[in-house]
Amino acid sequence: MKNADIKKLSIDELNENIKVEGQKLHKLKFAHAISPIENPMQIRDTRKNIARLQTELSSKVLAK
């Protein structure tokens, strides 16, 4: 998800996306612990995406 797409989301949508990405990260970490996943960069990308979403959420909450 690009930053331009993230900026267009509402606070509720941001919270929902953070929850979904968190679950995705948990599943990726679990799968990687059992047997190495094909592309371990997915873990890093998902973690960074969560950070982007949280940053935008905090800026919207503070602006409110």
Image: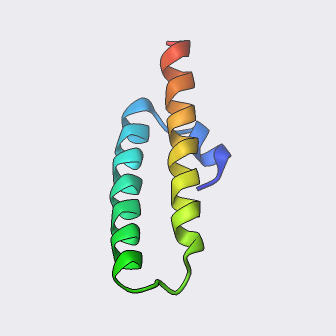
Describe residue 48's horizontal placement relative to residue 27 as left or right. right
On the image, the x and y values in percent for residue 33 come to 37, 76
Toward the viewer: 5 or 49? 49
Residue drawn at 58 percent across, 62 percent down = 45
Describe residue 2's horizontal placement relative to residue 54 as left or right. right
> Is residue 24 positioned above or below 7 on the image?
below
Give the tally of numbered discs: 0
Q: How is the image coloured?
A: rainbow
Residue drawn at 41 percent across, 77 percent down = 32
Residue drawn at 33 percent across, 82 percent down = 34
Describe residue 36's horizontal placement relative to residue 23 as left or right. right
Residue drawn at 57 percent across, 23 percent down = 59
> Is residue 41 positioned above or below 12 on the image?
below
> Is residue 33 positioned above or below 49 on the image?
below
The quadrant in which the N terminus is found is bottom right
On the image, the x and y values in percent for residue 17 come to 41, 48
> Is residue 64 positioned above or below 56 on the image?
above
Toward the viewer: 23 or 9? 23
